[in-house]
Every structure is written in C-alpha cells, then in structure tokens.
Image (cartoon, rainbow, N blue to C red):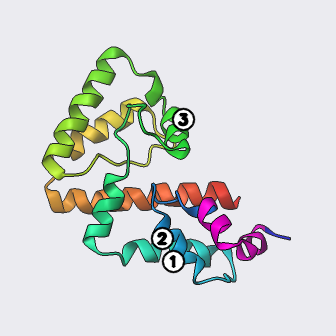
Amino acid sequence: MNSLDKFNKLKKSQFISTFGNIFEKTEWIAEKCYESKPYNNVNELVSKMIEIFENAEKEKHLEILNSHPDLAVAKGLTEDSKNEQKGASLNQCTEEEFVEFKKLNELYKKKFGFPFIIAVKGKNKEEILKKFRQRITNDINLEFEEAKKQVKKIASFRLSEIIK
C-alpha cells in the first residue's frame, strides 16, 4: 500500500491529527481537505490544501498568521515549529541575537499585527535575521502577501515530510 492509499483510508480523526498542523494550529483546513477524499495522487492532496488556504477570507489568513510563533522564543511552539527553528539554530542564539530577535518580533507585530513568518528550513539564523531586518521595512500589503507566501512554503515542507 502506498502512502496515498494510506491517507485516503484514514478515518477523519486520524486524517486531522496527521494533517492538522500543516498550517500552524489550523485543523479546519485538514477537515475541509478530508471532505474531498479520495485523492488520485499526492499532488492533488497538496494542491487541495494550498487551494483551501488561498481561498480563505482575509480574517482566516490573519488567524493563521497569528497562530505562528515568534522566532527564537521557545515558549508555545508546536513540535513542527520547534524542529524547524532548531534546524535553523534559532535555539542557539547568542545573547545579542536573542535580544535582536525579541526586539524585531515586537516591532514587527506592532507594525503589521501578526508575527514575522519565514520558512526557516535550509536557512541559518544570520540569513533569517537579515531577511527580518529587510522585511520589517515593507508596507502592510506587501508584507501580508509575503507572510502568506511563507506560510505556503512552510506547509509544503511539512507536507513533504509526512508524504515522503
């Protein structure tokens, strides 16, 4: 049995526990995705999840953005976020880096109304800080679109981990 057959045969609760954190703490996307089963191929499943996210209302996008944790802060992380941040060494910041992340997190949230979101997989803390400094100067519309783009990247990485 291939992984697609396995996912198509999952009961609703199993499907949601498997895919409920693809979009950080957002089980309703997995629930909607479940209703479209069966899937003919993995790309169809991935496309459906992304489509559900893209077609959501702005308020739902804001909820998803706000469910993401601050960077380099260990509190309240899901297992996925903890592993992703650890992979980028955000759990090993120097005191200076930690202070800068904390300051940028606060300024960013004050300016945009949601946390800074970046797909950290494959990046190091220096690259992330550089992007953070650049993106905090964006206007709200540009940054809202960039944050949604980053959420889709994170979701794609998480899906590929599950579907391998």
Q: Amino acid at mark 3?
A: Gly
Residue located 17% across and 63% down the image: 141
Determine whether the residue tagged by mark 1 lies in a helix, strand or loop: helix
Cα–Cα span, label 1 and label 3: 30 Å
Name the residue that disc number 2 marks. Answer: 29
Left or right of residue 63: residue 157:
right
In terms of image quadrants, where is residue 97? top left
Q: Main secondary structure of the magenta part?
A: helix
Cα–Cα span, label 2 and label 1: 5 Å
> Looking at the image, do the residues carrying marks 2 and 1 touch, with CB atoms under 8 Å apart?
yes
Residue 126's tag is none
How many numbered circles are shown? Answer: 3
- Of badges 1 and 3, nearer the viewer stands 1
Residue located 22% across and 34% down the image: 104
Left or right of residue 29: residue 6:
right
Q: Earlier in the sequence, mark 1 or mark 3?
A: 1
- Image quarter hosting the N terminus: bottom right
Residue located 23% across and 46% down the image: 135
Left or right of residue 127: residue 15:
right
Q: Is residue 36 magenta?
A: no
Residue 32's tag is 1
Question: Residue 69, position in %: x, y?
Answer: 37, 43
Q: Amino acid at mark 2?
A: Ile
Q: Is residue 5 magenta?
A: yes
- Image quarter hosting the C terminus: bottom right
In terms of image quadrants, where is residue 109? top left
Question: Residue 18, position in %: x, y?
Answer: 63, 60
Residue 160, placed above or below residue 40 = above
Q: Amino acid at mark 1?
A: Lys
* The magenta segment: 3-17
Q: Earlier in the sequence, mark 2 or mark 3?
A: 2
